[in-house]
Image (tube, helix red, strand yellow):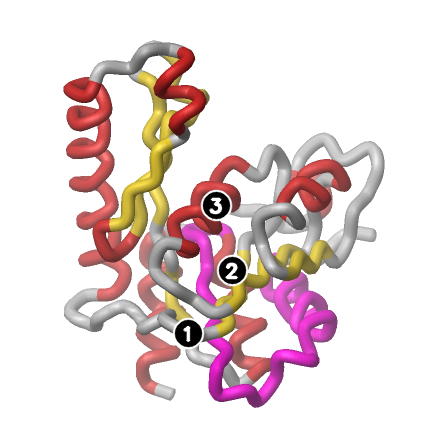
Amino acid sequence: MHYRDRSEAGQLLAARLADYADRPDVLVLALPRGGVPVAAEVAHALHAPFDVFLVRKLGLPSHEELAMGAIACGGVRVLNEDVVRALQVPDDVIETVAAAEQQELQRRERLYRGDRPPLDVVGKTVILVDDGLATGASMRAAVGALRQVGPARIVVAVPVGSVDTCAELRHLADDVVCAYTPEPFRAVGLWYEDFAQVTDQVVRELLDREALV
């Protein structure tokens, strides 16, 4: 099975999320940038509000792939205490990395959302959407950060994902919908005919269109 593009993937994913349609407590949040076209289709089908949830991993300066934590919209910061403790990461290193990532997060928030405030997730059922799950590092960071803001329930939803990663996320989220879990998995982009990079402009246009609805 291959999706034509992220829009088709979002339409098919929405069918798996039909139980969440027309509920006043449901919000759809996308992980930029690849998750945005997928989430836009999901939100449209479910008649749910739609926004982005910006998360920036805090990578070790000497090994940026290794996340020592994450920051997210609304000033949320989550630290991976196991990594920080095991590698004895000094506080000043954490602060330096966090400050740099906070600047980028704020830049993207201004670019994507303009003056619009983020959606209020307190007490809501939040469907977190991305275009796929490979290692799941960004989604794990997003779930951890979102949990701190007080939603009633977090649902992770993706069109395609690794079997192992989808299983791991079931320990963190309240529900996980991985529409397609091929084996071997290898990479998200292999399961899309068109996996072109999503630009900042496309993200902004999709969010602006939602704001006019």
Disc 1 residue type (three-letter): Gly
In this orientation, does residue 189 appear? no
Q: Which residue range is magenta in the image?
A: 6-34
Marks 1,3: beta carbons within 8 A: no
- Residue 101 picture quarter: top left
Spatial distance from mark 3 to mark 2, Cα to Cα?
A: 20 Å
Amino acid marked by disc 2: Leu
Residue labelled with disc 2? 128
The answer to which of marks 1 and 3 sits earlier in the sequence is: 1
| Residue 23 visible | yes
Q: CA distance from mark 1 to mark 3?
A: 33 Å
The local crowd at label 2, few if under 14, some if 14 to 19, many if 20 or more residues have their Cα within 10 Å, is many
Q: Are marks 3 and 2 in contact (CB under 8 Å)?
A: no
- Res 12 quadrant in image: bottom right
Camera-near label (3 vs 2) is 2
Residue at image x 32%, y 80%? 211
Residue 40 included in the magenta stretch of the image: no
Q: Could you tell me residue 67's position as x and y percent? A: 41, 27
Tag shown at residue 123: 1
Residue 18 horizontal side relative to residue 40, left or right? right
Left or right: residue 120 compared with residue 187: left
Closer to the camera: disc 2 or disc 1? 1
Residue at left offset 69%, top offset 45%:
166
Chain-order first, disc 2 or disc 1: 1
Residue depicted at x 66% and y 57% = 176
- Residue shown at 18% from the left, 58% from the top: 110
Q: Residues within 10 Å of mark 3 (few under 14, many from 20)?
A: few
> Dot 1: within a 10 Å radius of its alpha carbon, few (fewer than 14), some, or many (20 or more) residues?
few
**Residue ID for mark 3:** 197
